[in-house]
Amino acid sequence: MTVVKGAADTAARASGVVRKPVVLFFGTSLTAGAGLEPEQAFPALVEKKADSAGLPIRAVNAGLSGETTAGAVRRIDWVLRTPADVIVVETGANDALRGLSPAAAKANIEKIIGAIKKKQPGATIVLAQFFAPPNFGNDYTRSFSAIYADVATRENVVLIPFLLEGVAGVSRYNQPDGIHPNVAGERLVAENVWRGLQPVLAQLDRVRGAG
């Protein structure tokens, strides 16, 4: 994984202003924090964790409820109008819930990553893994779950293990719909994301400091 200083960072340093790295969270209702206040969603909680760890960031929540990977492909160019140092991609949950093609989802995720590399080549890309529920059968579950590691390896991006680890299927951590985390569940999701994101931010901080 290589972290590259962006033009915005260089300009900020030249002006004597220390800019917080921007972490753009691009995802579904799981990122948006459906049913909760914005400050209760995991991107805001990750921002607080980063501040506490001495790695302050500005989190931008670009979550959209109900979006499939195909919808994310259509939206990514618009979202990328916001310059970012790190882009966390959370997509695929709605594909899995609807039993959509794993191959199509994989191709869409690759298109999203390709768009990021083209439009923001200095950004570090982090991909959040999602597992399919078992109701479509073992073959579908295995095929869908394999998407993320395959894409991360092929595209050389950072992979965050299962976003909902310890939350999915646990009633006390979910809202009544059984799908979206409640306040307690969001704290666990934030922990899952932070474990993968903290090394990225630490490396970014070292690169910025060396500059």
Image: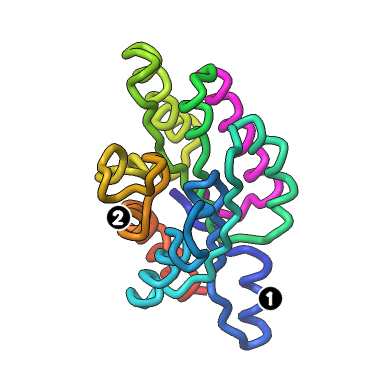
C-alpha span from label 1 to label 2: 36 Å
**Disc number placed over residue 11 in the picture, else none:** 1
Q: Is residue 199 visible?
A: no
**Residue 131 sits inside the magenta stretch:** no
Q: Nearer the viewer, mark 1 or mark 2?
A: 2
Residue 119 position in % (x across, y down) = 71, 48
**Residue 109 sits inside the magenta stretch:** yes
Q: Nearer the viewer, residue 93 or 182?
A: 182
Q: Residue at 50% across / 64% down in the picture?
A: 37
The local secondary structure at tag 1 comes to: helix
Residue type highlighted by circle 2 = Leu
**Magenta-tinted stretch:** 102-125
The local secondary structure at tag 2 comes to: helix
Q: Residue at 62% across / 71% down in the picture?
A: 9
Of labels 1 and 2, earlier in sequence is 1
Q: Is residue 86 above or below residue 98?
A: below
Residue 99 position in % (x across, y down) = 49, 19
Looking at the image, which residue sits at the far front? 176
Q: Is residue 125 above or below residue 6?
A: above
Q: Residue at 45% across / 75% down in the picture?
A: 56
Kindly identify which residue carries mark 2.
188
